[in-house]
Amino acid sequence: MVTLKNVVEKVKHTLLPGPIEVDKEVLATASYRPISHRSKEFIEIYRELIDMLRKVLKISKSYLITIPGSSTVGIEASFNNIVTPKTHVLVLDYGFFGYRLYEIARRHTKKVAYVKYSYTSPPTKEELLSVIEKNDFDVLALVHNETSNGYIVRFLDEIAKIVYEKNAYMIVDGVSSVGAESIDFDNSGIDLLITGSQKVLGGIPGLSIVAISERVYQYMLELKENGHSPLFYLDIPLYIEEFNKYGWTPSTPPINVVYALHTSLKKILEYGVDNYIRLHSDRAKRVYEYAVSSGFNLLIKDNYYRSNTVAVIDIGSKAMDIVNKLKEEYGIYVSPGLGNVKDRVLRIGMMGFIDVNVILHTIDLIKKLKSTS
């Protein structure tokens, strides 16, 4: 029989695209006794958490909420509040999580234009901008950083400008990018940006974070006045109203997840947000250079489109064998690929304060295991 303690004690390093390796101090605070989420003490903790998140995302004028649940619930809420059966949605898919956006969008409207690219040949900047220009839509949905193939869109501002000129709205899955990429949300042109507690922000799973522009917030209110009724649990204006009035969320938050994220955000802000972003870019550069020098190919060839939070290394075949051996023999958790590259690539998380030398050592082990497989 598998016991929780036996499983966890065997883990030496968590190098997944998420959840990430969590700092010991952060884990310790997650074990604190839960207190009432309606108490003045918890409200103070939660207000501090929101203030710290606003600093990370450079938000002073826009809105920011948390919704209990994984990042997917924040994405679901974003669609649920601004997409009606009459809404035209354009979804861009260049990886597994782009397809998930499509799956969510089509549950809200049948008017979904779906543009799919290959995992292994994602679009260039010019191709993406062109398809956005050519299509008519009310809402655009895309993934900022695709952990399935390590592809990142580094021109969100240019996309946002086109979306604004079309008088449309922009939903961005920033689940694995927020904290590692510089985002000035107030001035980004993004309308809804979603992330989670368990990725770059260094917490544990259980809390979805949504940044909301003033423009889209007013649109949500307008839709509600005209009869649109988002689900209670996903009602973004309700979350904003409850926080502004009382400093809390409409339903019970994951209290221990809030504790952990509060601790992690304090560490990030003490380190410096810009320094934290630079940590991710510098570390990614070293990892990619080392992987290439070790004889491996990278799935994303052009560095401009290469993620700073997940390294996707093309090992040719038997990825699952390597994943299992790393776990069983060394206690290191990495991920295989997704979709049609499932057994061809390894995905190595590079988020948070993980020591780069741990990742480089893991690449050495992959090379060793590959040579003997």
Image: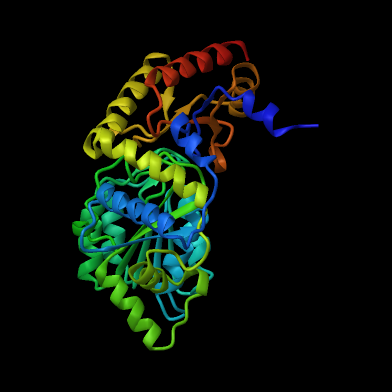
Residue 297 at x, y = what percent?
42, 24
Q: How is the image coloured?
A: rainbow
227 to the left or right of 152: right
Q: Could you tell me which quadrant the C terminus lies in?
A: top right
| Pick the front one: 373 or 366 | 366
Tell me which corner region of the image, top left, top right, bottom left or bottom right, holds residue 360. Answer: top left
| Pick the front one: 330 or 311 | 330
Residue 151 at x, y = what percent?
38, 41
Residue 327 at x, y = what percent?
61, 24
- The residue located at (24%, 44%) in the rendering is 182
- The residue located at (55%, 45%) in the rendering is 33
For this orientation, the residue located farthest to the bottom is 226
Q: Is residue 372 above or below residue 140?
A: above
- The residue located at (43%, 88%) in the rendering is 227
Residue 188 showing in the rendered view: yes
- The residue located at (33%, 20%) in the rendering is 289
347 to the left or right of 354: right
Q: Could you tell me which quadrant the N terminus lies in?
A: top right
Question: Number of labelled discs?
Answer: 0
Tell me which corner region of the image, top left, top right, bottom left or bottom right, holds residue 299. Answer: top left
For this orientation, the residue located farthest to the front is 40
Residue 267 at x, y = what percent?
33, 36
| Pick the front one: 188 or 318 | 188
Residue 118 showing in the rendered view: no
Q: Is residue 368 above or below residue 137?
A: above
